[in-house]
Image: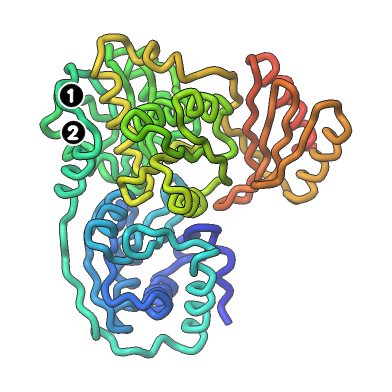
Amino acid sequence: MADLSRIFKAYDVRGVVPDELDEGIAQAVGAAFVELTGATSVVMAHDMRPSSGPLAAAFARGATSRGADVVNAGLGSTDMLYYASGSLNLPGVMFTASHNPAKYNGMKMCRAGAVPVGTDTGLLQIRDRAAELLETGLGGTPGKGTVTERNVLEGYAAHLKTLVDLSGIRPLKVVVDAGNGMGGYTVPEVFKGLPIELTPLYFELDGSFPNHEANPIEPENLRDLQKAVVSQGADIGIAFDGDADRCWVIDERGESVSPSTITALVAVRELAKNPGATIIHNLITSKGVPEIVAEHGGTPVRTRVGHSFIKAEMARTGAVFGGEHSAHYYFRDFWFADSGMLAALHVLAALGEQDRPLSEVLAQYSRYAASGEINSRVADQAAALARVRETFAGREGVTFDELDGLTVSGPDWWFNLRPSNTEPLLRLNAEAADAEKVAAVRDEVLAVVRS
């Protein structure tokens, strides 16, 4: 039987095309998805990668062969697909490899109402059934279901603007770097009618990413945006990843803003509308986030990394908002799904409601020094984690937590080291009271990991 374990990750499908993921696999996944969810209709969308359209068409052939109708939303961002799934109350699939390099592609699947499909909620069963179908043949009745085209961009943009009050904001100069990804498709529609002077960078849809990878968590991919913000005298810069479900913020000085700071800002705004509500933060978010949430009367809840885990915890707790270190932001009023665009609108509203520069607006939400995420490629992840634990074991005041990878906490510092869910990497995040302490912790951990 075909082994699909390499491309079925914790909460999505991701692989190199066509070596690991091809149209035959996509077709088998389409059939398996319908069989195991019982879906009678499915909505799908895809990003701008050259392989995305053909993979989506293959998935549709598999889904329709099992009698399901397919609503094809065509080009879109991942959060646009979540909007379609939520507003139409249909299971959905997005074809994208998000921030990964051009040779990759993948699938993000959800049930009706944008409820995520992950390893604990059916993804492994879909994987095993798809592998079986690849071995035995798909069968079914080709064309038994129908495929219809439906553009949901205008509805998506209008819906987002019902969730954030942007009326009366002052005129803003905004630079947006779409990284040749789907932000170049969605931003013009979302910003339409707002008092925004937009400077677009790399809005041409191009899945080969000719200017830089569409991964704003890597500092080198923000350089052009930072320079443009300063040279244009802009109020703010915003970068989106390839499927535009994440946003990264640059202040008016050209300085990168931590997603933890954005999480705290949006949390406070949501708590103002929903006093006493629950806010989700993952275990890599700054400890300033739960502190600020509690100070504003909210209940902070810590969870592991990954959108399916956070969405499940949000649904369980009824949380109004959740934020991740990776610049994913989740909203109860957006079907508990993540939307980088919605987070961006919150920041624009907070900035435009008053006259101070962004750096001053955000200063109250940033309390600690952080390393940012540092990746290490190691031959044996488990062995590296064990070496790190042994190094810090027995030190006074040090505690360990294994909710997700290894979190080590000291008196005035902490770090988390965890395997990536999508790449063969160990990811390090460290935080401390000051930059000097962060550097010391970072360097000690990396020396052990990379030894």
- Dot 1 or dot 2: first in sequence order is 2
- Which residue corresponds to mark 2? 191
Quarter of the image for the N terminus: give it.
bottom right
Q: Residue at x 36, y 43 (%)?
A: 331
Q: Is residue 214 visible?
A: no
Could you say where residue 238 lies in the image, as x and y percent from the top left? 33, 28
Q: Residue at x 34, y 28 (%)?
A: 272
Label 1 crowd (10 A; few <14 / some 14-19 / many >=20):
some
Q: Is residue 265 above or below residue 85?
A: above
Quarter of the image for the C terminus: give it.
top right
Q: Amino acid at mark 1?
A: Ile
Secondary structure beneath label 2: helix
Q: Is residue 354 above or below residue 337?
A: above
Label 2 crowd (10 A; few <14 / some 14-19 / many >=20):
some
**Residue 450 falls in image quadrant:** top right
- Which residue corresponds to mark 1? 196
Q: Amino acid at mark 2?
A: Phe
The disc placed on residue 306 is none
Secondary structure beneath label 1: strand
Could you say where residue 327 lies in the image, as x and y percent from the top left? 44, 36
Q: Are marks 1 and 2 in contact (CB under 8 Å)?
A: yes
Q: Residue furthest left?
A: 193
Could you say where residue 39 lies in the image, as x and y percent from the top left? 32, 75
Would you say 284 lies left or right of 357 here? right
**Residue 222 falls in image quadrant:** top left
Would you say 310 lies left or right of 153 here? right
Would you say 126 lies left or right of 428 here? left
Q: Residue at x 49, y 38 (%)?
A: 324
